[in-house]
Amino acid sequence: EYIIEAKLTDDKASKNLIYFSDKYSLKGYQLVKDLRLERKINELIEVRAAGKFLPEM
């Protein structure tokens, strides 16, 4: 199980995503349409390019 939040251009991890991911110990992904660089925020949160992540599901 995991949490997904989608954004158009915001590459900063959402506070809500971080909160719920930590609260329920779930992997969280922030998917961004126009993202230059994917990154891992911590062990549970990643900011990923939507165009790369969605075909992998």
Image (spheres, rainbow, N blue to C red):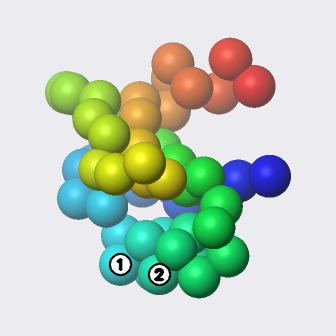
Judge from the rendering whether residue 38 lies leftward or rightward of residue 46; answer left or right: left
- Residue 13's spot in the image, x, y percent? 31, 61
CA gap between label 2 and label 1 equals 6 Å
- Type of amino acid at the residue the image marks with label 1: Lys
Residue appearing at x 21%, y 27% in the figure: 37
Tell me if 21 is positioned left or right of 38 in this view: right
Q: Amino acid at mark 2?
A: Tyr
Label 1: few (<14), some or many (≥20) within 10 Å? few
Image location of residue 50, percent across then percent down: 50, 32
Element under label 1? helix
Residue placed under numbered mark 1 in the picture: 15
Left or right: 8, with 10 as reference point: right
Residue at left offset 47%, top offset 81%: 19
For image coordinates 51% across by 23% down, the residue present is 51
- Rendered image: mark on residue 19: 2
Q: Is residue 30 visible?
A: no
Q: Nearer the viewer, residue 8 or 24?
A: 24
The reply to whether dot 2 and dot 1 touch (C-beta < 8 Å) is yes
From the viewer's perspective, is residue 25 above or below residue 41? below
